Amino acid sequence: MLALKDVGKTYPNGVHALERFSAEIAPGEIIAIIGGSGCGKSTLLRAIAGLDRASTGSVTLDNAVITSPHAKIGIIFQEPRLLPWLSVADNIGFGLADLPADARGERVASALARVGLTDKASAWPRELSGGQAQRVAIARALVPQPEVLLLDEPFSALDAFTRRDLQDHLLDLWADTRPTLILVTHDVDEAVVLADRVLVMRPRPGRLFEEITINLARPRDRKSGLFDSFKRRVLTALDRSLDRSVRDVTDKSSAGEAMWW
Amino acid sequence: MTVDLPALEQTAAPRAAPARWSRFARPALGLLVPVVCALGWELVVYLGYSNGRLVPPPSKVFQTIVELAKSGELSRHILATLWRVGAGFALGVIAGTIMGAISGYWDFAKRLLDPTVQALRAIPSLAWVPLFVLWLGIFETSKVALIAVGVFFPIYLGVMGAILSVDRKIVEVGRVFRLSGPAMIRRILLPAVLPAYVVALRVGLGLGWMFVVAAELIGASEGLGYLLLDGQQLGKPAQILAAIVIFAILGKLTDWLIEVAAAPLLRWQDAFGARGGQ
């Protein structure tokens, strides 16, 4: 159980990025956090990861207070952030330095196979496409078998087709060990296709605005009417979070524009 | 299939040929200008258009080198110079690496030390010569110290700059995997800094060769710089040119050694260029 209690963050320069954010997230749950820029999504994620400390409140995972990076919490960034001097296989095994070489090799090989990059094992990161690199980053984060995996707009730099592929692929991988996924995104489509719960945030200061439960069975059909109605609910919540009129929402959905910036 | 095979061969053959051609032809092309100039001058002197006294023909320079080598003098001079460059380079690299690493890693040290180092850097290094001679005497110590000073600054700047420019995002990956301080240095910082460090070493070595000449011109009884000075004072331009040619060869050779030694560690970097040619 991941518990966020009154998590707030004020940066040293006085920017009040996040205010009293509370949530309880069950093991294996998939949470999407969505909201406009400046609503503290990334701040929240970095606090959960232990990369930045919250100014107020606490993050606890199974009763352990998180103040620095934790072995059971993995994170995937917007960029793959692979180490350019390590081969693809060594990048994936980066977090397994404590294991003996043969055990590490086995884990890496199965992870490589799982993301479909066995033939790239000895390639350098710069020889990969954007989608391949992000798959390596996913494998690197998953191979230490974290209980919580944080994703900070992981697919936003990819083209639409690759993004959809990787969303489906992420669900596949999630099904292996069912870690808790917390995904920060700008993409309503992505939130609705992946998440059990969508947390809509509002800016200045960042805080929780609305929580929408997506009780759709997986795999989800992106073209179904029910899927669309959930998307509309999220879009409506987003627009209300920014005090926009509902008219804008219908315009957007009729234009088939799923990205929300 | 029978149609496909010849087609494949056809496309493969012309592609392989230019690759093989360029591997040998490219360095050969670079030799063209100096070789033509040398042969041209040789011919001019041979045909009597010039007596070649001030600008001796290549054959004369080569002959001088052979004579020096036969008498055993050449190896004595070369060893003396190599020793000075080696010792000065080693000292400069050690000091520059340590100081650069401290200043790059630790902000307080940078604010404390860097202004002083930058101020010292602004002094033309040859200005130290009289002081070094007074302090350290006219023999080896002052020469090695001068070379070390010349080598120190590019290494210091290179190491500090490289550490300061390590991508914060990559360091964050190390934090996510909870690397300890030493592990962070070994697994993230060192490999990230290495390419810039190799460049700094090569620049530093180049300056080392520059300063060994200055040091040996000041006063030496052996060394390639002494050959230069001796050639000037006794009016032997062939000996000066011989020393210059040997400087060029040694400089290139030692630079190449660094390049070759670093190549396996930097394979990840030029992998793109190597494969891009395919």
Image: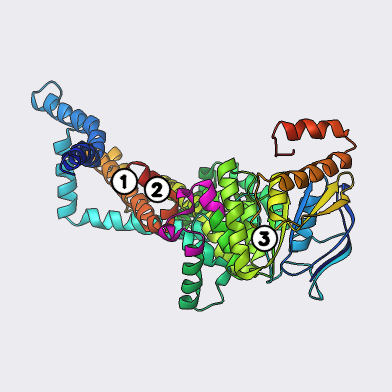
- Residue at mark 1: chain: B
Magenta residue check for B148 = no
Which mark is first along the chain, 2 or 1? 2
Element type at mark 2: helix
- Residue at mark 2: chain: B
Q: Quadrant of the C terminus of chain A?
A: top right
Q: Distance between the residues labelled 3 and 1?
A: 54 Å
Q: How far apart are marks 1 and 2 (CA)?
A: 8 Å
User: What's under tag 2, amino acid-wise?
Assistant: Trp
Element type at mark 3: strand
Q: Can residue A36 be seen in this view?
A: no
- Residue at mark 3: chain: A
Q: Do the residues labelled 1 and 2 touch (CB within 8 Å)?
A: yes
The disc label shown at residue A31, or none: none
Crowdedness of circle 3 by 10 Å Cα count: few (<14), some, many (20+)?
Answer: many
Say yes or no: labels 2 and 3 on the same chain. Answer: no
Element type at mark 1: helix
Q: How many labels does the image show?
A: 3
Give the side of residue B91 with respect to residue B11, left or right: right
Give the side of residue A192 with respect to residue B183, left or right: right
Q: Residue at label 3?
A: A75
**Magenta-highlighted residues:** A113-134
Q: Residue at label 1?
A: B247
Which residue is at a point 19% across and 29% down the rendered structure image?
A: B36
Q: Do the residues labelled 2 and 3 touch (CB within 8 Å)?
A: no
Q: Residue at label 2?
A: B209
Residue B120, percent across and down? 62, 47
